[in-house]
Amino acid sequence: MKVSHILSLMIFATLLFSCASVNDSKQTGTIVRDCTGTYLRVGDNQDYLVCNSDILTDKKDGEKVSLVFVYTKECAERDGKIMCMMYHENKGMIRVKSVK
């Protein structure tokens, strides 16, 4: 009887931690565009480069938005594209899942 309780508890804990590891984030910020790309600016001028910026084409520069996104280390949409030589400091890259 105790073994089945321990096993059930272990399965429940595993499921709980696997659900908690989903990396979706929701942030409200401002759209910032320049020749280097499209960014979500949050907090104290912390910019995140939006890889799939086509999802934000109907949003204007300076517009406030609420986004659900995941952090990413790869940005295939930008591979092979020529960008300007300007440097835009950012905290990383994100992939937008939905616009609220």
Image (cartoon, rainbow, N blue to C red):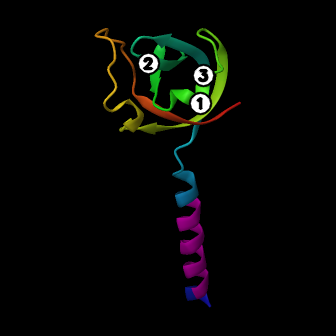
Spatial CA distance of label 3 from label 2 is 12 Å
The kind of secondary structure element at disc 2 is strand
At a point 46% along the width and 16% down the height, the residue shown is 46
53 relative position to 29: left or right: left
Residue pushed farthest left?
85
Residue wearing tag 3: 57
Bounds of the magenta segment? 4-16
| Numbered circle sitting on residue 55 | 1
- What's under tag 3, amino acid-wise? Thr
Q: Are marks 3 and 2 in contact (CB under 8 Å)?
A: no
- First in sequence, mark 2 or 1: give its number: 2
Answer yes or no: is residue 53 visible.
yes
Q: Residue at x 51, y 52 (%)?
A: 21
**How many neighbours does mark 3 have within 10 angstroms: few (below 14), some (14-19), or many (20 or more)?**
few
The outermost residue toward the bottom is 1
Circle 2 residue:
37
Image height of 57 relative to 35, above or below: below
Question: Badge 2 local density, few (<14 within 10 Å), some, or many (20+)?
Answer: some
Quarter containing the N terminus: bottom right
Callouts 2 and 1 close, C-beta under 8 Å? no
> Which quarter of the picture shows residue 88?
top left
Other residues around mark 1 within 10 Å, as few (<14) / some (14–19) / many (≥20): some
- Most foreground residue, 89 or 85: 85
Q: 63 or 1: nearer the eye? A: 63
Residue 44 visible? The answer is no
Coordinates of residue 97 in the picture (x, y in percent)? 59, 39
Q: Is residue 50 above or below residue 2?
A: above
Circle 1/circle 3 CB separation < 8 Å: yes
* Occupied quadrant, residue 28: top right
Residues at marks 1 and 3, CA–CA distance in whole angstroms: 6 Å
Q: Amino acid at mark 1?
A: Ile
Q: In what element is the residue under mark 1? A: helix
